Amino acid sequence: MSTPQPAGPGAPPDPPPGILARDLHRSFGTVRAVAGVDLTVRRGSVTALVGPNGSGKTTLLLILAGLLAPDHGSVLVAGADPGSSATARSRVGWMPDAFGTWDSLTAVEVLTTMAGAYRLPAGQGRARAWELLRTVHLDDLAAAPAHTLSRGQKQRLGMARALINSPEVLLLDEPASGLDPRSRIEMRSLLRGLAAAGTTVLISSHVLAELDEMVDDAVFLSRGRTVSSEQLRVGVTERRWRLRTLDGPALQRWASAARVTLHPDTDAPDGAGSVLVDLTDDAAAAALLAAAVGAGVPVVSLAPVSGRLEQAYLSLDTERR
Amino acid sequence: MTTFDVPLEPGHPLDPAPPGPDTSARAISWQGVRTIAVLELRQRIRSTRWRVALAVWFALVGLVSILIGGAFAALGGDPTWSFGLVLMFVLGLGLVVAPTLASTAINGDRNAGTLAILQVTLLSPADIAVGKLLAGWAAALAFLAVSLPFLIWSALLGGTTVAGFFLSIVVLALLLGVVCAIGLGFSALTARTAGSSVLTYVAVASLTVISLILFALTAPLVTTTEEVEVYGVSEEAMAGDQTYECETFTAQREVTHTERTWWLLAINPFVILADTGAQPGLDPRDSGPFEAIRSATNQVRSGPPDVHQECWLDSAPPPTVDDAAPIWPWGLAANLLLGAVGLAVAIRRLRVPYRTLPGGTRVA
């Protein structure tokens, strides 16, 4: 496996990416799990890794975590090769999709064990463990054996475990499954806070809506290859919004006068009172709303039909496996 | 004089990692080993089955020891047998329990999803393997420690020397560690915990029983008819009418060359322990089990004698016990080698990143 050279004096001035993967391939027997992944994750961003089942998300994360060697291609995570470098290991946090807990250990012991595994001195490890328990709101369960925790609590403990070494790059495989809505919101603010402090976060999930509000970028995988990577906060394309009104005919009259193209809403629960409209950005939505209300149309709501990710995902025309 | 001003590029980390192999995660470290060993022991100690097992063990060894001691007292026999019998019982029971202590350490963790999260840390494969081995061994030593009162009691009844007692305990402890290491190796090789447990028991059976059977079965293979030196009454002398007199002559005899197969006995943990506990210079015919096993093994090891004794005229000379060359260092070394192989296999199989995955396993 060849490793890219570190950025030389002639390198571009922007910071090196948190994760850089070039032309990754990995097969298991005849199954080509990863077949040509190119990935650049900006330092300090939260990036979604999106793809249907079997598209190679977990395999890709295993390669990035340094557990699987790629058959071909090169990886740099936090500036080092995860497969052969202790430096990369010390800078990466990984939370697998399915993981176990040491059943008879207490939550705080799980974290101090991990701290020891990262060679933190005992006192420092204990302090870090308690800090993280408070972060994921498990400090009142610190002395409870791990097997008594609920699924969502275990998931939060898993997140704390991945953060024990204060990683520069955080790899999360389906971290939100099993979390209640409140915990999801807390995870979102935790990840945004980490990203603001410079941590690079790569997060995979099936539930696009839960990623939508927290990610900056998205990488789409299909059949083991990257099909698209988008910077969602930059250059948002036209989105479809749903406009609901109490008076359908009045809306139609206003729309034809204002030359707004309306599409029939086939999914709407309340028939004629709901239509779809394509808008470029939030400002366009605000302007549309102001105009419609100003014209006396009794508008109930105007909201995006689907999340940005979902829209991007569906527009990819990926085939389901 | 020219000075070079090296500007720091903005945004670059001050400590850029040199991409490429660095060996710090490959070496073994005390902190890493201790982290794993403490983790494993904590899990073991907190399960209630563990305490029950120790209690059952204590009761079992105690019962057998008292029965052995009582039997000799009641029959008025020589109590020198008691230490040998109790030690053999503890070894036998230990060989039954030790495989369970480490033979699921790696594949069990892999199935439970708790192995990969350790492999991504700074722990080296050697840290994980040695930590798990130490934890399994410590558990085995706990069983040995529970049996110590009865071992000491039976040793006080007689049947061994002070040096023999301590040597036997140390060698027994090492043998239990070897079984743990073999189990660890199998747990790294197989995907299912049942498979590695069975393989470990097969390995223990091979060392103790199957080696014995093989030794017996290979006896015909190493038996040949040869011209050998015989000391006795020759056939010519028998045919003649002169007085019978023993002399040395050459004759055809069936000779079993056990010196070629003696190692099958030497690797047997029971033989090794008998050799360490035996009292030097005792007549094997009227002493304990250790001396009997030791003298038999020594005979087998030296193979056929240079001169076959067939003289029935003289009273037979007492069998000599060869104390000069103990067998146990050979046997112990062979066992330690097996354990080292098991440990090496485990370390090798724990190495990440995986290039090939063992059949039927997932990384995480």
Image (cartoon, coloured by chain):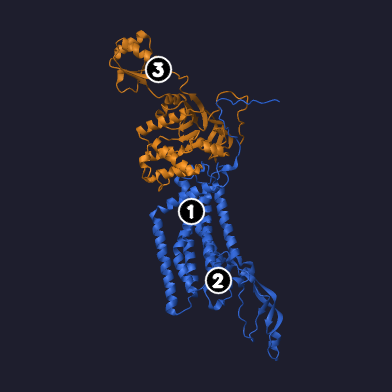
Share a chain, discs 1 and 2?
yes
Q: Nearer the viewer, residue B112 or B241?
A: B112
Share a chain, discs 3 and 1?
no
Report the side of B6 relative to A111 (left or right). Answer: right
Task: Look at chain A in the picture and name its colour.
Answer: orange
Q: Name the residue under label 3.
A: A282
Chain-order first, disc 1 or disc 2: 1
Cα distance between the residues tagged 2 and 3: 91 Å
At x 46%, y 65%, the residue is B148
Report the side of A258 relative to B315 (left or right). Answer: left
Q: Mark 1 points at which residue?
A: B135
* Number of other residues with Cα within 10 Å of mark 3, as a class: few under 14, some 14 to 19, many 20 or more: few
Disc on res. B278: 2
Which residue type carries mark 3?
A: Asp
Task: Look at chain B in the picture and name its colour.
Answer: blue
Above or below A114: residue B237: below
At x 42%, y 45%, the residue is A109
Above or below B295: residue B10: above
Quadrant of res A137:
top left
